[in-house]
Amino acid sequence: MTILKKYPFYLRATVILFGLILCSYALANLRDILVPFSFALLMAILLNPLVGRLESWKLPKVPAIVVALLVAAVIISAVWYFLATQMMHFTSQLPMLEKKATDLVFRLQQDLSRKIPLDKQNQYLAEAKAAINPLIARTLGTVLGTMTTVFLLPVYAFLLLYYKTLILNFLYEIFAEENEAEVRSVLMQVRGAIQSYMYGLLIEGLIVAALNAIALFILGVPYAILLGILGAILNVLPFFGGILAALLPIMVATITKDGLHTQIEIAVAYMVIQFIDNHFLIPYIVSAKVKINALISIIAVLLGGAVWGLSGMFLSIPFIGILKIVFDRIPELQPWGRLLGDRSADEPKWKRARRMPRRKAAARQGR
């Protein structure tokens, strides 16, 4: 970092820009390999404390890793089975829901026909459907591509946990050039902070899913548990996720219920849940030290979607959080960590720098 500062700013900026372009190109072309590896990395981070606890009980490393992966597989399979059964029940009701949706659209078209002719409405609907179909196809392709590589997750996670010491030693040997104790301390802090951050995200998601489901159940919205869990998953995406999470139950309520009072109640309930999440769950569970500001969150989600599709949108926020943890604990990278965070200084540094000569001049006059 000190060596780079010897070069002019325009040269450093050009090198960084080309580095980012090459990195983005490599990430986009290696998505089939890196997407399952990234999910496996997050899984390994979450399972590492369990593996350590099993090893402290005198269980060898390989059986400890296998047991931890089996526990994760059982939990994921149970959640997947529950969601699948809920989806099957939901799909069994699709003919009735489709009929109600068709009636609703017909009534809406009749109301709009006073201002917009029916043929124009049908043309707009056809154009919207033509625009949405490629998006649905890309989303399904991303989901199917993820499903085809899901068998790589336990393999990657097992190898990451098995070679954990080797990877940490590699990082230690790369960065431990001057102060070995400081590098060891930074690595230990980063590992602990990443684990607590990932567990915080998991607990926050469970609480948001429970709050969503309870609110929808009280309001009498069908499929409350399914919609609550989907809302918690979408909540990972900043701003967009909260809107999509509220739109799903509003659409179901519009099809299954008469009037608009239920939709308004759902919107109010989700606004309250978002307030609780942003002001209580994230600061006290996920930790405000790792909270990412709104600008970086939106840019990260959009870039993640452009590079890795739907998977990249969900992986972007955890990885930006991990980067912030690393940046905050390395002195040369702390300005980048502050840029990612949501806490700004009370006074811009350029104002303080401009005031320093005045203070020095006043001090000299006082003498």
Image: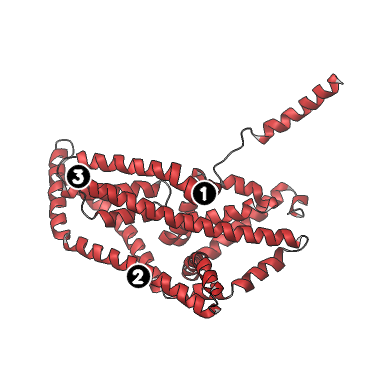
Precedes in sequence: disc 2 or disc 3: 2
Query: Pointer 2: what residue?
Result: 77
Query: Would residue 72 be found to the left or right of residue 41 on screen?
Result: left
Q: Nearer the viewer, residue 284 or 336?
A: 284
Callout 3: helix, strand or loop?
A: helix
Residue 150 visible to the viewer: no
| Quarter of image, res 137 | bottom left
What's the amino acid at mark 3?
Answer: Lys
Left or right: where does residue 319 sit relative to residue 252? Answer: right
Q: Badge 2: few (under 14), some or many (20 or more) residues near its Cα, within 10 Å?
A: few
Specify the label residue 205 is tagged with: none
- State how the image is colored: secondary structure
Looking at the picture, which amino acid does disc 1 mark?
A: Ser
- Residue at 16 percent across and 55 percent down: it is 97
Could you tell me which quadrant the N terminus lies in?
bottom right
Q: Amino acid at mark 2?
A: Ser
The vertical placement of 279 against 58, above or below, is above
Q: Position of residue 291 (x, y in %)?
A: 52, 47
Position in image of residue 125 (x %, y %):
22, 50
Q: Which residue is mark 1?
A: 287
Gap between marks 2 and 3, in whole Å? 48 Å
Q: Secondary structure at mark 1?
A: helix
The residue tagged 3 is 120
Please give left or right for residue 44 compared with residue 79 in the image: right
Disc 3/disc 1 C-alpha distance (Å): 52 Å
x, y percent for residue 190 = 61, 58
